[in-house]
């Protein structure tokens, strides 16, 4: 079935911005929800509708998805207050919102729902993040809709909060105390994430399927930090912290103003290897997922005058 009118929730963020561009390239009619239009200013040059609305309000949410053929939910948070089984921020973004989206879809007759989850999502997982992601995924899978769930590893690309953050640390500090240095990740390029989602949007066989999204290589956290440093010509000394010191470091960061660089819940999430169980499903259309070695130098070094959209087009061979 062809889905032409797409409602995108969480579309002004890192992944969403690339996905919007991919949908537009396919000729889809796209509307993006945002709490403040200014936060989606980078999308306003595209032929889409940017709608200021509160998706947590069921009435506004229902109005936003009205007359659409499909809804895509990308909303996610990495930090939040502590709670059991998860704190209020995780509950609001990962559990309550998917429930509201599923209900709005059912009320408005929107059958197609694409939902971004995470590798390791599990209602009994080791962290609030993974438990809440698991609960949200469970709600979507039991919704009765024509759903597809994506479980992504950490995502890299222009303006990411992964390799850019590590490069910043390498520039700033000669020594980096690193908790969970041996935690494993399989980073996936944001362009491949967008491509996978648009490739299955209209694919009937993708209904009621869970797809893992991961790149070609597995790295430890320490290896990713070293790679970012080597790419920009910096080589900070990495000190691997034992668990007790790592948790003390995270707790101290949690008490500082603003969003912490790392939290105890982030450390708990890293107890589960962030790697795929196998190769990408063939229907995703990603024959050769992009590697960090091929893509990251384009934006970490600042030598390439590419926008986030240009980087996607380059890897899509356009």
Image (spheres, grey):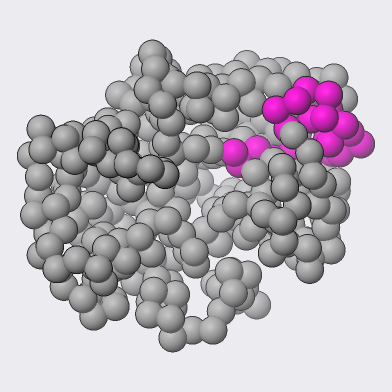
Q: Is residue 145 visible to the viewer in this orientation of the structure?
A: no
Q: Is residue 281 visible?
A: yes
Instruction: Describe residue 203's horizontal placement relative to residue 106 as left or right.
Output: left
Residue beneath the point at 73% across and 32% down: 55
Quadrant showing the C terminus:
bottom right
In the image, 164 versus 280, the foreground residue is 164
User: Is 110 part of what is drawn in magenta?
Assistant: no
> Which residue ends up furthest to the front in the rendered image?
257
Q: How many marks?
A: 0
Nearest the viewer among 249 and 218 is 249
Task: Classify 15 as above or below 79.
Answer: below
Q: Give percent across and percent down for residue 72.
A: 69, 40
Can you give x and y, in whole percent of width and height, for residue 113 in the image? 71, 33
- Residue 63 coordinates in the image, percent (x, y): 87, 31
Magenta-tinted stretch = 55-75
Query: Which residue is drawn at the image coordinates 38% and 43% (left, top)?
Result: 257
Q: Quadrant of the N terminus?
A: top right
Q: Left or right of 168: which side holds 215?
A: right
Query: Which residue is rendered at x = 38% and y = 56% of the image?
Result: 162
Q: Residue furthest right?
A: 67
Where residue 215 sits, quadrant-wise, is bottom left
What x and y, as percent, mark residue 76? 53, 38
**Image quadrant where residue 201 sits:** top right
Q: Is residue 147 left or right of residue 291?
A: right
Q: In the image, what residue occupies the spot 42% across and 36% down?
A: 79
Q: Is residue 141 above or below residue 195?
A: above
Name the residue furthest top.
84
């Amino acid at each position: 079935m062809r889905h032409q009118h797409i409602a995108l929730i969480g579309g002004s963020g890192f992944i969403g911005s690339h996905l919007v561009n991919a949908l537009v390239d396919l000729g889809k009619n796209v509307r993006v929800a945002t709490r403040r239009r200014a936060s989606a200013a980078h999308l306003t040059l595209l032929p889409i509708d940017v709608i200021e609305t509160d998706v947590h309000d069921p009435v506004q949410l229902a109005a936003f998805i009205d007359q659409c053929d499909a809804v895509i939910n990308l909303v996610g948070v990495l930090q939040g207050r502590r709670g059991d089984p998860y704190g209020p921020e995780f509950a609001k973004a990962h559990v309550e919102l998917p429930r509201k989206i599923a209900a709005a879809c059912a009320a408005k007759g929107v059958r197609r729902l694409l939902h971004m989850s995470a590798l390791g999502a599990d209602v009994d997982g080791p962290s609030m993040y993974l438990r809440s992601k698991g609960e949200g995924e469970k709600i979507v899978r039991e919704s009765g809709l024509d759903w597809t769930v994506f479980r992504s590893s950490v995502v890299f690309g222009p303006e990411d909060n992964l390799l850019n953050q590590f490069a910043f640390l390498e520039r700033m500090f000669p020594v980096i105390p690193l908790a969970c240095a041996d935690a494993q990740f399989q980073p996936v390029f944001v362009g491949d994430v967008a491509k996978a989602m648009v490739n299955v949007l209209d694919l009937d066989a993708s209904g009621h399927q869970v797809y893992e999204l991961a790149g070609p290589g597995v790295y430890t956290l320490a290896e990713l930090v070293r790679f970012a440093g080597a790419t920009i010509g910096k080589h900070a000394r990495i000190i691997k912290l034992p668990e007790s010191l790592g948790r003390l470091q995270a707790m101290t960061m949690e008490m500082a103003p603003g969003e912490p660089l790392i939290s105890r819940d982030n450390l708990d999430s890293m107890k589960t290897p962030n790697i795929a169980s196998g190769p990408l499903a063939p229907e995703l259309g990603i024959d050769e997922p992009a590697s960090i070695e091929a893509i990251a130098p384009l934006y970490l070094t600042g030598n390439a005058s590419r926008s986030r959209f240009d980087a996607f087009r380059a890897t899509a061979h356009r």
